[in-house]
Amino acid sequence: MKYVIEDLRKEIDRKKLPVIRIEIDYELMTLYDAMQANDNVQIIKSKEKLKKLRRQLLELSRKE
């Protein structure tokens, strides 16, 4: 039973990876737009979100 649950978690993690990569791409576009507009508030928000997404991506990558 333990191995079945572990395999299910790995499968869920594998499905999350592409979603996180898409979110990173989107947030990079948002950051670029904010930099072009000199929107300092959005720049800070985008950088924080990118840090969070990066941590998630690294955690999932390590589990594989």
Image (spheres, rainbow, N blue to C red):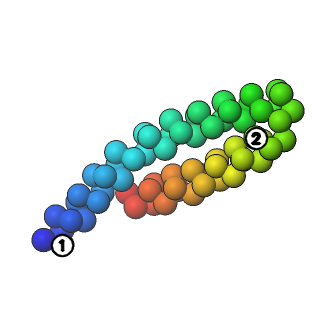
9 vs 39, left or right, is: left
Position of the C terminus, as image quadrant, is bottom left
**Residue name at image x 12 percent, y 71 percent:** 1
Q: Residues within 10 Å of mark 1 (few under 14, many from 20)?
A: few
Where residue 9 appears, x then y in whole percent? 29, 60
Residue depicted at x 45% and y 54%: 61
Counting residues from the start of the chain, the first of labels 2 and 1 encountered is 1
- Residue under label 2, please give it: 42
* Residue for point 30% across, 57% down: 10
From this viewpoint, which residue is outermost toward the right? Answer: 38
| Quadrant of residue 19 within the rendered picture | top left
Q: What residue is shown with label 1?
A: 2
The location of residue 45, given as percent across then percent down, is: 72, 47
Q: In the displayed structure, does residue 18 sit left or right of residue 5?
A: right
**Which residue appears at 72% of the width and 36% of the height?**
31
Image height of 22 relative to 64, above or below = above
Q: CA distance from mark 2 to mark 1?
A: 44 Å
Pinpoint residue 34: horizontal percent, then vertical percent.
77, 33
Q: Is residue 34 left or right of residue 27?
A: right
Q: Are marks 2 and 1 in contact (CB under 8 Å)?
A: no
SS at circle 1: helix
Q: Is residue 6 above or below residue 50?
A: below
